[in-house]
Amino acid sequence: MAASEENSALFPIFILTIMAIPLVPYTMVKLSRAVSKKQRTIHCQCLECDRSGKYKRSLFQKISNFSTWSNLTLLLLWVVMIFLIYYTKNMSRETQVFDPFSILGLEPGVTDSEIKKAYRRLSIQYHPDKNPDPEANKYFVEFISKAYQALTDPVSRENFEKYGHPDGRQGFQMGIALPQFLLDIDGASGGILLLWIVGVCILLPLVIAVIYLSKSSKYTGNYVMHQTLSAYYYLMKPSLAPSKVMEVFTKAAEYMEIPVRRTDDEPLQKLFMSVRSELNLDLKNMKQEQAKFWKQHPAIVKTELLIQAQLTRESGVLSPALQGDFRRVLELAPRLLEELLKMAVIPRTSQGHGWLRPAVGVVELSQCIVQAVPLSARKSSGVSSEGISPFLQLPHFSDAVVKKIARKKVKSFQDLQEMRLEDRSELLTQVAGLSATDVEDIEKVLEMMPSLTVDITCETEGEEGIQEGDIVTLQAWVTLKRPNGLIGALPHAPYFPFHKEENYWVLLADSVSNNVWFSQKVSFMDEGGAITAASKAISESMEGSGAGVKETNDAVREAIEKVKGGSRLVMGKLQAPAEGTYNLTCFCLCDTWIGCDKKTSLKVKVLKRTRAGTRGLVSEEGAIAEDGMEEEDEIEEEDYDDDYESEYSEDEDDKKDMDEKRGSKKANGSVKKKESSSEESGSEEE
């Protein structure tokens, strides 16, 4: 019984240990994430962003933001842990080791007479005949009497002095730290113990594993459902126009799970009438088009209308029930659009290329959703060939303001950005009729807008030039600059109710063939991660080229300085296509800002691979020719190697010179053939 009581006393310590193993590291991770999020919150300071309430939260909003299920569960577990620590601490004080000398108030080695005197003194104080208190009676029977018996018996006293126990040397005992109530049931302690072991050690982990696997099997690593990826993959087409991307985007399985209520019919009908012009309906057959639109799945209709409410800034007319669905649609939109973009650039062709046109359409839709700008504003108009969408992302701008400044020959967004501060202020106040406060807000947003530059190269490591079939290394440095000096920042997006970080997509593509050769996502928020990735990539590249330790360290140091200055390294490998000159374009597309995308032209020249795989090895007499090659082939290869300067295509003048050389050599060859033919005819006449 004593052993079971001792094991029962260890039960709180056992539970405390089991709770502390996962709880402490999880809490540290949560706190580190909260601190990093707080440090990275660099947002726009204009009045519209302040009024949006995304960055300045009231006490109630902070409490509601904190009171999520995970945080409340974490807090409850810590309360239980603190209680167990307090209980264990007090319990350890109450638990005492049986020490007869200490109970009788004696020192080891005393005589029998001193033991008897101490026993008589305590008997007067705790004996039931002298003290009617039940606690005194219990203490006398369980402690004083046992201590006196242990010390008056010579054998027991000798065992205690030698081994610390009246019964002599004790064997090794093991017990299970279970509460006493599980062991107090007569005749059922074994069954209760078995049920406890099966329930806690087998059934509970099994239930948790089944729940986790059932949920994780539906989602990918980016928390997007597998069903959504499958739908996006099969609905994606190479000729998908940007205006048709919306039809594919709304087919996400996550949006199908949004509840469709009968009470939403009337508000959705009103919303349809206000956004009807943005739905790409045929005006000539409006009745048929309208009926066709409402025949779609109710969840798809609801999702598209809610997205159009964001694009047209009509969310204020939504009912309270639709407001919750509206926020859910926008909360899911960024990661769904990212997966949709991946489905556009995933290798589809035999050369392993993706599709450019739908990828650009996905990025444009993302920009419009974040900035709450209609897709129709991207169409070219009489004001600007690029549309008025870049202007509408600025605070206090509208169609009327754009038309007013267009009369002063400010027709493109770039024209507005390149104006001097004084001239722009005068234009906006005197021509557009904006106040000084409005102009100040516009200047704050213009200072937040990024400017991108891309420095890209393609080469075969350790070789001169690019031959068909080579593994080509692509290296691009993407540099971001802002007028206010920031590098990583949150964009100006007062109508998007959630924090949205800037992401950039680097696409190396052939615009003519609609092929994407290479794609990679770039972020400027995590400088530490960018330094680590750039250092690793540069060191591996330098080691592969056979560079020394000093050269590698210098290159890594230079890369780190570039990253700290606002650059990000993009590296990848791709296989060189067939022989030819390819006019490629490197797109750097931002998924949040409109009008900040960057295009860089790149001409890549791929040489024909020789039969022996040589790369123009030159001897003292000229190019080495293979055995069995005709003389004309040798001449053509010689000319091709002489005209080649780098993997990039030549200037127009160099191209003309090359054509003239080839033409003259062909003319000389034809003259030689004519002379030989005339000689043969003369010999026949003779």
Image (cartoon, rainbow, N blue to C red):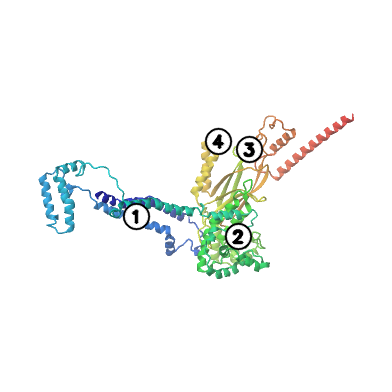
Amino acid type of the residue that numbered disc 4 sits on in the rendered structure: Gly
Rendered image quadrant of residue 70: bottom left
Q: Which residue is mark 1?
A: 81
Q: Secondary structure at mark 3?
A: loop
Amino acid type of the residue that numbered disc 1 sits on in the rendered structure: Met
Q: Residue at x 60, y 69 (%)?
A: 273
Between disc 3 and disc 1, the foreground one is 1
Q: Which residue is mark 2?
A: 247
Q: Residue at x 74, y 33 (%)?
A: 631
**Structural crowding at the residue carrying mark 4, measured as other residues with C-alpha within 10 Å and reported as few (<14), some (14–19) or many (≥20):** few
Q: CA distance from mark 2 to mark 4?
A: 51 Å
Q: Position of residue 561 (x, y in %)?
A: 52, 45
**Structural crowding at the residue carrying mark 1, measured as other residues with C-alpha within 10 Å and reported as few (<14), some (14–19) or many (≥20):** some
Earlier sequence position, callout 1 versus callout 4: 1
Rendered image quadrant of residue 87: bottom left
Q: Are marks 2 and 4 in contact (CB under 8 Å)?
A: no
Q: CA distance from mark 2 to mark 1?
A: 52 Å
Q: Is residue 643 above or below residue 254?
A: above
Q: Which residue is mark 3?
A: 464
Amino acid type of the residue that numbered disc 3 sits on in the rendered structure: Glu
Q: Which residue is mark 4?
A: 546
On screen, residue 662 versus residue 32, left or right, reads right
